[in-house]
């Protein structure tokens, strides 16, 4: 399965910890493609809401997941032919996504697609919640990013301009609890992950540190 050139970098951590910024840069520096696996869970959630399916209806969501066509390319996500790039970041999808991501059948399907994605490219930088623990436990480098809840909420409220800081902070706290407390692949550090607190460090400094572990 894995060839000598198969290089996977796994980046996990909670919302707002810096996974996307650092993952994309690391990919650029290493010449590896980057996959935002959270966008895939958001894509399935978007597909469910569009069909007026209740995200807590586990059986219906389980049947839906394998049928949803997800195309991630150049920062855009196309779901069943519809550009969902903006909507997957909106409050409806953000509030429902943890429920969908807790569904074991959804996880099984998306993990399969994530492994396939990396195999087709001989590796890549994948970011999510379970990349180092479940999707690629043999990744060349596993990174677990953290940051204080305040810093994470500040970062997110800059991105989501139509919600105030308190609402964003409350949504993040709720999502943290759901992602860490779920039965199926909860968010947790892999025992051999490099743990980096991004609260008070520059992006460049962190990327330089991480590159030193790969070469
Ligand atoms: O990274 P994000 O906020 O876009 O992720 C959206 C949701 O998907 C988040 O609540 C946790 C879930 N997720 C997951 O369970 N496993 C992943 N590999 C990626 C995201």
Image (cartoon, rainbow, N blue to C red):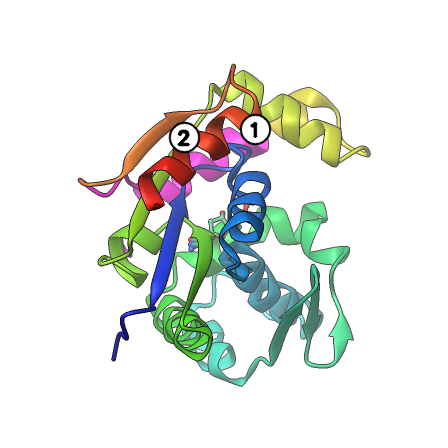
Q: Position of residue 79 (x, y in %)?
A: 67, 74
User: Which numbered disc covers residue 209?
Assistant: 2
Where residue 24 sits in the image (x, y, percent)?
A: 58, 48
Residue at the limit of the structure toward the left, as seen here: 191
Corner quadrant of residue 184: bottom left
Which image quarter is the C terminus in?
top left
Q: Position of residue 116 (x, y in %)?
A: 41, 78
User: Mark 1 falls on what kind of element?
Assistant: helix
Q: Secondary structure at mark 2?
A: helix
Q: Is residue 148 magenta?
A: no
Point out the residue furthest to the bottom here. Answer: 67
Q: Residue at x 48, y 60 (%)?
A: 100
Residue plotted at (29% across, 61% down): 136
Q: Nearer the viewer, residue 24 or 154?
A: 24
Going from N to C along the chain, the mark reached first, 2 or 1, is 1
State the extent of the magenta-drawn residues as a range. Answer: 170-191
The numbered dot on residue 203 is 1
| Relative to 64, residue 186 above or below | above
Report the residue at 58% width, 63% height from top. Answer: 45
Residue 108, horizontal then vertical, whole percent: 34, 72
Alpha carbon separation for disc pair 2 and 1:
10 Å
Q: Residue at x 77, y 55 (%)?
A: 86
Residue 182 in view in this figure: no
């Amino acid at each position: 399965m894995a060839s000598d050139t198969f290089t996977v970098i796994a980046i996990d951590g909670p919302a707002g910890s810096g996974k996307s910024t650092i993952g994309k840069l690391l990919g650029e520096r290493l010449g590896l493609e980057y996959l935002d696996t959270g966008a895939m869970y958001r894509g399935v959630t978007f597909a469910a809401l569009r069909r007026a399916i209740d995200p807590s209806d586990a059986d219906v969501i389980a049947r839906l997941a394998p049928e949803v066509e997800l195309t991630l390319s150049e920062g855009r996500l196309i779901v069943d032919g519809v550009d969902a790039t903006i909507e997957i970041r909106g409050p409806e999808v953000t509030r429902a996504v943890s429920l969908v991501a807790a569904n074991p059948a959804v996880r099984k399907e998306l993990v399969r697609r994530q492994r396939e994605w990396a195999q087709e490219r001989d590796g890549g930088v994948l970011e999510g919640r379970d990349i180092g623990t479940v999707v690629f436990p043999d990744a060349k480098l596993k990174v677990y990013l953290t940051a204080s809840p305040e810093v994470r909420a500040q970062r997110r409220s800059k991105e989501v301009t139509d919600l105030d800081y308190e609402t964003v902070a409350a949504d993040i706290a709720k999502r943290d609890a759901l992602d860490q407390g779920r039965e199926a692949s909860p968010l947790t550090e892999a025992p051999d992950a490099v743990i980096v607190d991004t609260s008070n460090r520059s992006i460049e400094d962190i990327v330089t540190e991480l590159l030193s572990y790969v070469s």
